[in-house]
Amino acid sequence: MPYYRHSRSPVLFSNQYHSRLLLEADYCNGGDRCMMIRIIRPKPSEPDDVEEIGSFDRAIAIIRYGMRLLGFWPQDTWFLCNLQCGSIFILIVLTVFPAIVQTYSVLYTVTDWNSVMHEILGTVPIIPLLARFVFMKVMARNFRFILYTMTADWANYRYLAKRSRQIMIYYAKRGRRFSILSTMLLMLATMGFMLTPVVNMWRNNGVWNATIRTLPQEGLYPFREKESPVYEILYVVQSLTTFFSTTAFATVDCFLYIIVFHACGQFDVLAATLKQYDGSIRHCYTKNARNCACLSCIVKLHVHILSTFNTVDTVLFAQILAAFSRHNC
């Protein structure tokens, strides 16, 4: 890394260098008192600033819209968001309750274990689904802190070296691609699940025949659910509930994708920064940790990654436990 000497302090550069370089002063004790100026970080060009804003926004845009639809977004703390989340939670519970009642009745009336397992496997997925609603609200404060640190990391983007900026862009794009792919696959599966009863009735020429009508989620109802217009209303309600359920699965998982990819990117940024650090830069008390390149400030900028992974580990452990209980059933 190049050094520039000057016999007096302060050292003045032309406007061209001053606008493109961030400098750190370090005094030497040799012969004549001199100032050695080390180039720390290049200031990003205008296209880099545009890419910075766009990459971070696009990385979380898909999950932000979906989580706000369900009232999951951690930064939305007002009462209406909690009411929205609670209403969707109650709607899902009421929709699957007839299926739970039917499963309970099958356990005590049917001796065919194939039918029993079929009913159980149709209702057990409600466990990890409702767990996502609970954990997103219980861990909302932790997720708010994570979003705050992610925003701070991207605000620090312009002060990083080119290699570090490329790392952050790379992981942001990977997180976005995983989110898009997961959302598309889940939505395709949801469409297939919702259209299967209609396709089966159409193939059997029984669309208007109430005796062979089927719902996406069968259940034990206290009324005749196969007659019009009750059947159509139930079909629409179950379709809406399935859409909310798919959105809950997709957005929460993709939100964790984004967090994990961002934390991995910060580890790579830390590794790249430490590779360039040679121990000769002292702390500058006139600058904050974002501008200073000493070892202490480098650690301060990345120590929050530990709490990020701690939160993600807690949520993932709960989800794995819910999924494990589902498969054991």
Image: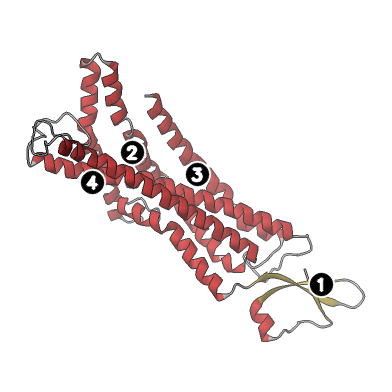
Distance from the alpha carbon under mark 2 to that under mark 3: 18 Å
Circle 2/circle 4 CB separation < 8 Å: no
Query: Considering only vertical position in the picture, is 309 above or below 216?
Result: below
How many residues crowd mark 3 within 10 Å: few (<14), some (14–19), many (20+)? some
Locate residue 5 relative to residue 172 in the image: left or right.
right
Query: Which residue in the protein does label 4 denote?
Result: 240
Which residue is drawn at the image coordinates 67% and 76% (left, top)? 21
How many residues crowd mark 1 within 10 Å: few (<14), some (14–19), many (20+)? few
Give the residue type at disc 1: Tyr
Q: Quadrant of the C terminus?
A: top left
Q: Which is more N-terminal, label 3 or label 2?
A: 2
Query: Which residue in the protein does label 1 denote?
Result: 27
Q: Position of residue 44 (x, y in %)?
A: 60, 72
Q: Which mark is residue 312?
A: 3
How many numbered marks, from 0 up?
4
Q: Which is more N-terminal, label 4 or label 2?
A: 2
- Secondary structure of the residue carrying tag 4 is helix
Distance from the alpha carbon under mark 1 to that under mark 2: 61 Å
Quadrant of the rendered image containing residue 271? bottom right
Q: Nearer the viewer, mark 1 or mark 2?
A: 2
Residue 17 in sight from this viewpoint: yes
Give the residue type at disc 2: Leu
Circle 4/circle 1 CB separation < 8 Å: no
Q: Position of residue 234 (x, y in %)?
A: 15, 40
Quadrant of the rendered image containing residue 163? bottom right
Give the residue type at disc 3: Val
Locate residue 244 relative to residue 314 in the image: left or right.
left
Q: Which is more N-terminal, label 1 or label 3?
A: 1
Q: Which mark is residue 130?
A: 2
